[in-house]
Amino acid sequence: MAKLFTSSIGKKLIMSVTGLFMILFLTMHMVLNFTSIFSPETFQAVCDFMSLPIVTIMTPILAAGFVFHIIYAFVLEIGNMKARGGLKRYEVANKGAADSWAAKNMIWLGLIVLLGLAIHLTHFWSKMQLQEITGGEVADPNMLLGQTFGNIWILILYLVWFFAIWMHLSHGFWSAFQTIGWSGSKWQKRTKVIGIVYVTLLMLGFAATAVAAYLRAHGYIA
């Protein structure tokens, strides 16, 4: 088990698998949030569904993979800095992939994602899921959407965060599949296209949710 965390292949495999957990978690989260665009009642109904036992068990597992992915990335980067005396490029399978801006700046993108996650947790998780765990009063999800995204500066901050996640995933999606052996040379270009399309739709879903919440908070839509 120790070799899995110390070998080069093991490190990339862990980052790939936990990265896929991150994508699954974000997908589930986006689908939930996107329902708020249709109506507050629909969003409330989906939030109630998320409280079912099977969902409450699955969500922390996916979220744990998300968090572990970020923490482990920083642990690896600190080790790289100590060993090489400076920042090291994100490890990829070939030089062409390493030449992309996202590949060269994965650690900085990860830092932005981490900071955005911390802000997001204070806005939503601490007032909903944490209250359920501690037995406190759970805030109304529709009210939280309006309060948070009704502020134009917070909306802009979230949109920047969504873009950083898009940049991170646009590289990480296909790289993860390549690392675990699901994307050979024949499928590499196809996987890249599929990944870019998928993460673009994913993050557009988040952005649309935030913008719709802003418009609803200011009475532009019902």
Image: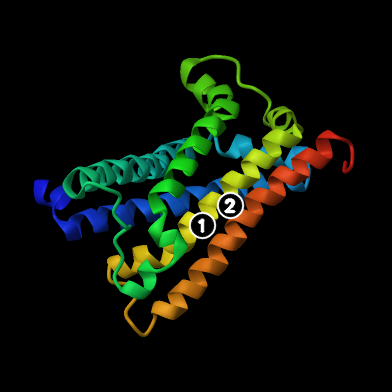
Residue furthest out toward the bottom: 186
Pointers 2 and 1 in contact (C-beta within 8 Å): yes
Above or below: residue 196 compared with residue 23: below
Above or below: residue 104 compared with residue 44: below
Residue 112 percent coordinates (x, y): 49, 42
Question: For mark 2, what is the residue?
Answer: 163
Q: Is residue 172 visible?
A: no
- Please name the colour scheme applied to the rendered image: rainbow
Q: What element carries label 1?
A: helix
Q: Is residue 202 visible?
A: yes
Q: Is mark 2 on a helix, strand or loop?
A: helix
**Amino acid type of the residue tagged 1 in the rendering:** Met
34 horizontally vs 197: left or right: right
Residue 143 percent coordinates (x, y): 73, 28
Residue 167: which disc?
A: 1
Residue 51: which disc?
A: none
